[in-house]
Image: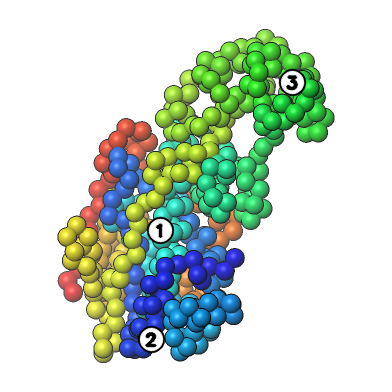
Amino acid sequence: YNPVLMTDMYEYTMLDATLQDGTASRDCVFEVFTRHLPEGRRYGVVAGTGRLLDALADFHFADEDLRFLRDRRIVNKETVDWLEHFEFHGSIRGYREGEMYFPNSPILQVEGSFGECTLLETLILSILNYDSAVAAAASRMTSAAKNRPCMDMGGRRTNEWAAVAAARASIVGGFQGTANLLAAKLYDLTAIGTAAHCFTLVHDSERAAFESQINALGRNTTLLVDTYNIEEAVKTAVEVAGPELGGVRIDSGDLASLAQRVRNQLDALGAVNTKITVTNDLDEYAIASLQTAPVDSYGVGTQLVTGSGAPTCAMVYKLTERAGDDGTMVPVAKKSTNKATVPGRKLAFRSYEYSLADCEHVIAGSKEELDMFTPEEGWQDLLVDFVDHGRIDDRWRGHDAIIDARAHHEEALKALPITAQSLMRGDPVIPTQTLVLPQ
């Protein structure tokens, strides 16, 4: 797909006006941050950066895009001519995927001309807001699962493109696989899935359905056992597949009680290695309630793709520095009530005590001031470079980048105080301190 029109109209009307008055070429620094976490959450998880870089690589205007902008009179002919040859020549840096963020963390900084940077605003926010929301929900779920794998089954609970984005973001947050085949293809993810209730119902008997599935997929498959009577289904499943049956799935009822009974029944039938998967509108709280139950894995749908009640992160994209008439960079900021911003470009560090994070440090100032700033010993630099003067660093794209992001997320979560993994509502687990250097 072409991402150039996945944006708000005013990005183009602003571009049109600034090309006419000459300010489109002014060097600028934009920043993505959030003023607050979703209510009661202790931390956020950055996700979507790899998707953003993929979109940036494809951010070129086809003839039909330019024709649409011209025919609708959204921009004038001179702007159409400018867009025809558009390439992003700026630089982007920020928190890596899988990293934790907190209120006022400079999650992403975009530097380039105003014309270039303003076109990316809506695209950046739509990707980061949704993907980070899903990754944070996935993180809470995998924490509650305590090393038992979680799988994405949410594709039918959101729109088709969000399903692909959610599958990818869930991996960043700790999930192990997805039922979405397009996501599995695009990002080389583990695909999972066997059969639904309709498969059992279309056969003349449950036994016939199980025989069909095992003939097609082998004894290591997972059989859905709650279409009729779970106890009878488990008995039939082991009779058909033998003790080598790979797994059974329970999708309804009191999951903890049923999992215990099914585990005991499987063991009594000799199927001691058969795994139990549970589904049925799970969220992090339901998963936590199953910690003592003999469950081997979880399939999560609706609550994953909706951010478990927080489907966006309230991230914003604000201009923090721009060139003046003489080319000198000038810090700028909003002063609106409750929406004030911190002027200047940023550095970001995390400090630790006894190997646990204790504070997020945001340093604001001019490029010259920040170049001379020396962080205290032991502070972790949180910013990495994604794009350098138009050149995209491919280390942050593709399958390996997603797996690296999941590993980084796991380590970063371990480095937070343990209260980060509490499901009780609370304040951000570490504070953010902002230091504005003399301008």
Which disc is residue 390 wearing? none
Disc 2 from disc 3: Cα separation = 68 Å
Question: Around disc 3, counting alpha carbons within 10 Å, would you say few (fewer than 14), some (14 to 19), or many (20 or more)?
Answer: many
Marks 1 and 2 close (CB-CB < 8 Å): no
In this rendering, position of residue 334 left or right of residue 3 = left
Q: Residue at x 64, y 16 (%)?
A: 230
Work out whether 195 lies above or below 160.
above
Q: Mark 1 — residue?
A: 95
Work out whether 206 lies above or below 438.
above
Mark 2 or 3, nearer chain start = 2
The type of residue carrying mark 3 is Glu
Q: Position of residue 170 (x, y in %)?
A: 51, 45
The type of residue carrying mark 1 is Tyr
- Dot 3 falls on a residue whose secondary structure is helix
Q: Position of residue 10 (x, y in %)?
A: 38, 72
Marks 1 and 3 close (CB-CB < 8 Å): no
Res. 258 in view? yes
Q: Mark 3 — residue?
A: 206
Disc 1 from disc 3: Cα separation = 51 Å
Number of numbered discs on residues: 3
- Dot 1 falls on a residue whose secondary structure is strand
Of residues 17 and 125, the one nearer the viewer is: 17
Of residues 387 and 199, the one nearer the viewer is: 199
